[in-house]
Amino acid sequence: MSRGQAADIARGAGDDVDVATTRFLLYGLLPGWFVPGLADWAMHRRTRIEDTSGTKESLIHALMMAEVGAPIALTLCCRINPLVLSVQLGAAAVHEATALWDVRTAVDSDREVKPVEQHIHSFLESLPVGALASLMCLHADQVRSLLRGGRGDPDAWRLLPRRRPLSPRYLAGIGLAIGLCVVAPYGEELWRCRRAARRRARAGEADPTPRKESRKESEDSCVSRFSWRPRALSRSS
């Protein structure tokens, strides 16, 4: 394909590509995000998070939801500019760091993180990156403004309403889906962890996750248990 042909296609399809990408983000990627989120909650329930990592990991999950929810709310209600892009980029970076903390917490608590759950995590980590990349392609001018520090744009660092607001029906549907697929299941998870913690406290268990015995301590215990030691002679003999 020649360079001129590529330019003609880009000029003719530019508006169509923008519309298709926007539709994909609004009606494909964002609603589809709820599926791996529910699957991850089901894996936490299956591996009995309330009896292993407990409230700590559940609160980390709530933090991750907030890290994703804040930039989504800004994107749905506000105009894309360097300020919103900065929030999105910062939230994506913090979300990745929190995801590492989440898995480390689960592993240290002896909660089994199965390969299926790890695969679900890959979707939950890649979807924000894909959404952000699509938005940056749609708003390349704002990306350039961000790289220039917003110079020459008086609205670069202000929150502004969208020029074409999304329909109230769409926003209500997304809000309902977030309530049913995010707030309700993960709220149930946190409630379940808190209930289990109170039950352990009543039973006298101060630490919800038993201390793991190190390999050296285990070996020393086995040696002391099965090795023969000569009995000390009494002074009277």
Image: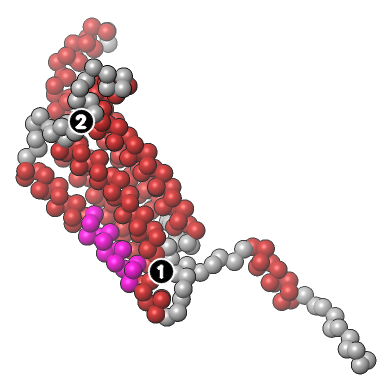
The 10 Å Cα crowd at callout 1, few under 14, some 14 to 19, many 20 or more, is some
Residue at image mark 2: 158
Amino acid type at circle 2 is Arg
Report the span colored magenta. Answer: 182-195
Quadrant assignment for the N terminus: top left
Residue 234 in magenta stretch: no
Say which of 137 and 232 sits in front: 232
Give residue 223's position: percent from left, percent from top. 73, 71
Mark 1: amino acid: Asp
Q: Which residue is mark 1?
A: 51
Rendered image quadrant of residue 106: bottom left
| Residue 213, placed above or below residue 146 | below
- Magenta: main secondary structure equals helix
Residue 175 versus residue 130 in the image, above or below: below
Q: Mark 1 or 2 closer to N-term?
A: 1
Q: At 24% from the left edge and 33% from the top edge, which residue is drawn? A: 84
**Residue 197, above or below 146:** below
Tell me residue 163's x, y (percent): 10, 29
Q: From what the image shows, is residue 24 above or below residue 235? A: above
- Taking the magenta stretch, the answer to whether it contains residue 185 is yes
For marks 1 and 2, give the CA distance. Answer: 46 Å
- In what element is the residue under mark 2? loop
Q: Quadrant of the C terminus?
A: bottom right
- What percent of the width, then of the height, locates residue 89? 32, 34
**Where in the figure is residue 119, as x and y percent of width and height?**
38, 48
Mark 2, other Cα within 10 Å: few <14 / some 14–19 / many ≥20: few
